């Protein structure tokens, strides 16, 4: 194909918004807030799986902890009549991600799985994506991190260790997604089966509040849940079209 | 100058300006050495430490990922706005009072831009890869993202630096030529190179006039676009209190405002220390004072509109951001800014104030402090109050940041001090133009007229 | 070989009238050198046109087209889905177009200036041979107005007479150049 043809075809294909709906997979996570007990196992699992740095007391006090998945706590009412609402907050892998448009070097973009990816090698650290993200789930490496022995022995070889000056965030455990796709290919299957990929947080959740799957497949577990009446997205009014769907807590009148 | 009983002659200007370049007092060297030392100690040393340690050397944290570095960047870009822009507008409208001051104003533009570009380097996490923002073919098969407001910035600032360099250089060619003939040694070589063999022929003057006018016409819309684009770094986000349509005009007005104040400061210094009292007069301060008054009113108006729209929207994010800015942790800074930028400049309504040099100096410095605060508040207050209350936070600058802030001032001063010894800091030929042309002298012995 | 006669004048009016008489005496078009642009040159020596505006226009159009193509074509070649936006998005690319329009407009204006003002010339550096066809008098950069005319050796006397008649303060042969 000649150069001009390539351009013409690219032009035709990419002119319209919504091309992402044709992606191979559209990974989605559902989090059932009714089942979530706020134990924080997912936070730890994510830390272990993705080589998150342990920043130490000083940096923590400065507000520089790195937690791709964090527990947000909201208190309601006055003491003693208080209620605690918990919501796990991670990158929502927005289809209309504001963080992607602002990156000058395309270090963060949408891949063919509908995931919002972060390329650490490409990042120059302008930190504008963190400003543009309304969910505040992007974390910056303010300095190089070290792991005290024996923690340095447990680093996940599938995940890179980030250097100072780059941005990072939840990847939907892209290394696991990759692996599942490879296995499927080796087995001669065209697609990954539902439930075959489980990110670390989903796998760990003791109350099985979290689920992960492909939204493109109408039969999948998440597609079914998505249609339910309790499903909602955080900050939906901003039109980010996020891929993490929360299931509303069922209020029982006391 | 015109009505003066003892009018300046062309040669006087020539001698004054050449003297300002060639004759260097010991005070100058002291000032240069101080500025250079401050630049090294306050700017480069902390910066190198930060390069080694990471951005963590600054005070930024999780919600407040942007800090004083970005505020300084906007501030310096803003300060750059009055030099070349004002000079272009005044050139096109043929205002003769521009002529004595515009060279130093344009130099201010250029050096502010240099400092602003340095601030970008200081700001980003991995400045050693900053060239990735430029579209150049590479083996990585990677390309910058032309949809990013930050890349608009890269484009706009590159163009702006090119444009203002060319503009100040082109306007100086005749003056370089004039200085060339009066210098010896390395200076002569330098000015010969810089003046490109300018002879002042009618053809050259004609071409210079047109080229200069075209450049001015091109640079005015450029300067307006540059600060609009800087504002879009913020306004294109969906952060409450940043996502506003008024931001582009707000930034442009703010930029011209602080730039004009900066010119007043520089004028004062030049007048005081470079003996340019005859060329920079009360007239300049009077006109600049009027400009400051108009700009401060415009600026206040935009601020009121901003508050009103935020309040009227009733959206919880907007109102919270607004409440926080007006009454939250950073509120003292906010009210300081209002005092310095909206209340104090009203003094410019009085002619006596406008034509007194020292009060104008204080006012101009106060305005720029206020404008710096404005930029800081835009960054700090908006980022600490975003949508999810769990991620609210507080950002306080660290010692490294404050040192670098002082260091940028020293860097700017150093560049400016070097400038006054290289460029004729008052445009000779344009000052000459504003004066009466020499009159025909009755035939004298020297010339010898033929009967 | 052309000889140059340069007359120095203390004021622009006499320089202009000298230039006028030189021209009407059929000695060719004289060149004026002055510390400031002289008003009314065009009435005496005829109107001047420059090619600078063509350069600016060409530069601006070139910059605009290349700016848009730079953004749009490379975006197709490096298709990065970003923020659910189309790969070829007009609003941001128009900004790139705008900036590059101005950038190339500026660059080409400068080139146009150099070309049409014939700069840099032989006076540029001492490394270059002094250009004999470009007489120069340093006083003309300070407060004198010079009229220079290149003519054959027979006409030198006539040119000098005309210049003196117009009130020249001094006559040079214009070969001394820069110190
Ligand atoms: S949640 Fe934030 S970081 Fe994740 S895709 Fe959306 S905007 Fe980007
Ligand atoms: S999906 Fe993976 S990376 Fe994302 S929060 Fe869960 S464990 Fe962390």
Image (cartoon, coloured by chain):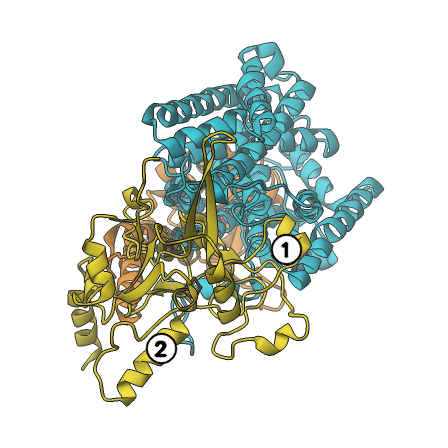
Chain colours: A yellow, B cyan, C orange
Image location (x, y in percent) of residue C8: 57, 42
Residue sitting at x 68%, y 74% = A149
* Residue C47 visible in image: yes
Which x, y percent locates residue B180? 65, 51
Q: In this view of the protein, which residue sits in the foreground, A122 or A78?
A: A78
Query: Where residue A178 is drawn, which disc sits there?
Result: 2
- Number of residues whose C-alpha sits closer than 10 Å to that of mark 1, classed few (under 14), some (14–19) or many (20 or more): many
Q: Is residue A227 above or below residue B35?
A: below
Of discs 1 and 2, which sits in the foreground? 2
Q: x%, y% of residue A225? A: 23, 57
* Marking on residue C120: none
The crowd level at tag 2 (other Cα within 10 Å; few <14, some 14-19, many 20+) is few
Q: Chain of mark 1?
A: B
For the point 27% across and 55% down, which residue is it?
A: C61
Q: Give the labeled residue for mark 1.
A: B56
Are the residues tagged 1 and 2 within 8 Å (C-beta)? no
Q: Are marks 1 and 2 on the same chain?
A: no
- Image-based side of A22 in relation to A236, left or right: left
**In this view, A132 is above or below B8:** below
Mark 2 close to ligand 2, CB under 8 Å: no
């Amino acid at each position: 194909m000649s150069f001009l043809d390539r351009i013409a075809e690219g032009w035709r294909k990419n002119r319209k918004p919504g091309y992402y709906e044709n992606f191979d997979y559209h990974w989605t996570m559902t989090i059932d807030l009714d089942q979530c007990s706020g134990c924080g196992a997912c936070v730890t699992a994510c830390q272990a799986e993705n080589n998150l740095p342990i920043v130490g007391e000083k940096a923590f006090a400065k507000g520089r902890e790195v937690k791709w998945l964090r527990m947000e706590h909201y208190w309601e009412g006055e003491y003693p009549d208080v209620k605690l609402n918990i919501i796990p907050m991670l990158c929502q892998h927005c289809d209309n991600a504001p963080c992607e448009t602002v990156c000058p070097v395309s270090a963060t973009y949408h891949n063919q799985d509908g995931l919002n990816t972060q390329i650490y090698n490409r990042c120059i650290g302008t930190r504008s994506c963190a400003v543009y993200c309304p969910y505040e789930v992007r974390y910056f490496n303010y300095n190089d991190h070290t792991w005290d022995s024996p923690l340095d022995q447990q680093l996940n070889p599938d995940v890179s260790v980030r250097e100072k000056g780059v941005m990072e965030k939840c990847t939907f455990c892209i290394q696991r997604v990759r692996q599942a796709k490879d296995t499927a290919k080796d087995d001669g299957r065209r697609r990954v089966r539902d439930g075959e990929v489980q990110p670390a947080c989903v796998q760990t959740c003791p109350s099985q509040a979290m689920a992960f799957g492909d939204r493109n497949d109408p039969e999948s577990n998440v597609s079914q849940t998505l249609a339910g009446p309790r499903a909602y997205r955080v900050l939906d009014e901003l039109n980010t079209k996020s891929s993490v769907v929360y299931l509303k807590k069922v209020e029982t009148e006391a | 100058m015109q009505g003066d009983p003892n009018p300046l002659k062309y040669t006087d200007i020539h001698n004054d300006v050449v003297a300002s370049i060639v004759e260097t007092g010991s005070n100058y060297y002291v000032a240069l050495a101080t500025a250079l030392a401050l630049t090294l100690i306050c700017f480069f040393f902390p910066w190198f430490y930060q390069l080694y340690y990471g951005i963590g050397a600054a005070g930024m944290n999780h919600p407040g990922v942007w800090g004083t570095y970005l505020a300084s960047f906007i501030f310096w870009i803003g300060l750059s706005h009055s030099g070349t822009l004002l000079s272009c507008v005044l050139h096109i409208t043929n205002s003769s009072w521009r002529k004595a001051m515009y060279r130093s104003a344009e130099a201010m533009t250029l050096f502010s831009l240099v400092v602003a570009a340095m601030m970008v380097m200081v700001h980003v996490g991995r400045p050693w890869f900053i060239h990735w923002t430029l579209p150049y073919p590479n083996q990585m098969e990677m390309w910058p993202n032309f949809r990013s407001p930050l890349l608009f910035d890269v484009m706009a600032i590159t163009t702006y630096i090119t444009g203002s360099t060319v503009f100040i250089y082109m306007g100086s060619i005749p003056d370089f030529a004039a200085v060339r003939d009066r210098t010896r040694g390395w200076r002569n070589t330098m000015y010969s190179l810089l003046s490109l063999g300018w002879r002042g022929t009618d053809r050259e003057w004609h071409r210079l006039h047109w080229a200069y006018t075209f450049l001015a016409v091109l640079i005015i819309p450029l300067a307006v676009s540059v600060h609009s684009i800087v504002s879009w770094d913020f306004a294109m986000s969906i952060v409450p209190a940043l996502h506003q349509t008024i931001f582009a005009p707000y930034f442009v007005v703010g930029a011209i405002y602080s730039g004009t104040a900066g010119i007043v400061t520089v004028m004062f210094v030049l007048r005081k220390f470079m003996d340019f009292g005859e060329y920079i007069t009360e007239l300049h301060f009077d006109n600049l004072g009027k400009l400051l008054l108009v700009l401060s009113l415009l600026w206040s108006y935009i601020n009121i509109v901003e508050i009103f729209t935020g309040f009227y929207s009733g959206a919880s994010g907007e109102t919270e951001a607004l409440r926080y800015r007006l009454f939250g942790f950073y509120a003292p800074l906010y009210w300081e800014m209002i005092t310095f930028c909206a209340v104090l400049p009203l003094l410019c309504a009085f002619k006596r104030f406008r034509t007194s040099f020292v009060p104008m100096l204080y006012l101009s410095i106060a305005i720029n402090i206020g404008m710096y605060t404005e930029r800081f508040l835009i960054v700090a207050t908006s980022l600490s109050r975003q949508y999810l209350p769990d991620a609210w936070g507080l950002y306080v600058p660290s010692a490294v940041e404050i040192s670098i802030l002082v260091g940028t001032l020293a860097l700017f001063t150093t560049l400016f001090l070097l400038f006054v010894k290289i460029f004729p800091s008052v445009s000779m030929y344009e000052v000459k133009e504003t004066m009466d042309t020499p009159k025909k002298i009755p035939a004298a012995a020297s010339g010898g007229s033929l009967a | 070989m052309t000889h140059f006669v340069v007359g120095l004048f203390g004021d622009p009016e006499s320089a202009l009238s000298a230039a006028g008489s030189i021209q009407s005496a059929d000695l060719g078009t004289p060149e004026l050198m002055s510390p400031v642009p002289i008003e009314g040159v065009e009435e005496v020596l005829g109107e001047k046109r420059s090619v600078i505006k063509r350069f600016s226009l060409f530069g601006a159009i070139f910059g605009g087209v290349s700016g848009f193509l730079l953004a749009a074509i490379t975006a197709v070649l490096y298709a990065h889905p970003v923020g659910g936006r189309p790969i070829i998005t007009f609003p941001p690319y128009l900004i790139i177009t705008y900036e590059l329009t101005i950038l190339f407009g500026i660059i080409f204006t400068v080139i146009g200036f150099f070309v049409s003002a014939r700069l840099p010339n032989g006076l540029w550096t001492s490394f270059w041979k002094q250009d004999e066809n470009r007489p120069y008098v340093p006083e003309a950069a300070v407060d004198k107005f010079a009229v220079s005319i290149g003519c054959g050796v027979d006409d030198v006397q006539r040119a000098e007479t005309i210049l003196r008649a117009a009130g020249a303060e001094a006559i040079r042969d214009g070969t001394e150049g820069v110190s």
